[in-house]
Image (cartoon, rainbow, N blue to C red):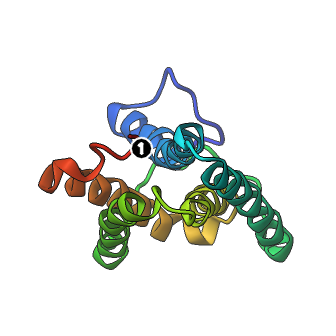
Amino acid sequence: MRSGISIIRMDMKEIITLTLLWVCVPGVYAAMFVFALLIIARTVSGEQRTSAKAGIWAGIIALVAYMIAKVDIFREPLFTQTILPPMDYAAAGIGFAAGFLIIGIVRFLVPTRLVGAVVLLLVAASTIGLYSYVFIESMRPALLYITLGFGFGAFAHIIVIPASLRGLWT
């Protein structure tokens, strides 16, 4: 058994696994955060903009509170895991449902003063999810499938109801 991981000696399965675990999943969390920033950038009225900005700060405060609460189970990540956890259909289904629903929620709440709640949800979910995925090893297997399910669910909503995001920014 090798103690470290060398990119030169890795087989294709290990490269794919590392890419899935440490690029794709964190990428979904990053996309959620960027989506929240885009919502803030596209709000027009002063009241909506204030609500959206408050939402981002509330999401960051939620992250800090979560980090404080979970400091005892914080572990430095090992980026050498080359085995995917077994498929968790329940977690993927929960993620799919959440991703599908969040697009509908965004569509209805962004044009209102509740845009801050949408931003809060996206910022808190993306930052807390990423923190938990990277630094709380026991949560990583479930979060892997929840996150991938979430991304698939969000895009499935757009595939089924393409008008979901059209006109969102007007």
Residue 25 in picture, x, y percent from top left? 47, 48
Q: Outermost residue, top direction?
A: 8
In screen coordinates, is 13 left or right of 50? left
Disc 1 target residue: 20
Residue 5: x and y in percent read: 59, 35
Q: Is mark 1 on a helix, strand or loop?
A: helix
Identify the residue shown where x is 59% and y is 61%: 129
**Front one among 63 and 35:** 35
Is residue 75 in sight in this rendering? no
* Residue 6 place in picture, x, y as percent: 57, 28
Amino acid at pointer 1 = Leu
Q: Which residue appears at 31% of the width and 56% of the height? A: 154
Residue positioned 36% across, 58% down in the render: 107
Q: In this view, does 55 lie to the left or right of 150?
A: right
- Pinpoint residue 134: horizontal percent, then vertical percent: 64, 54
Q: Viewed as shown, does residue 157 lie left or right of 94? A: left
Within-10-Å neighbours for mark 1: few <14, some 14–19, many 20+: some
Q: In which quarter of the image is residue 116?
A: bottom right
Quadrant of the snapshot with the C terminus: top left
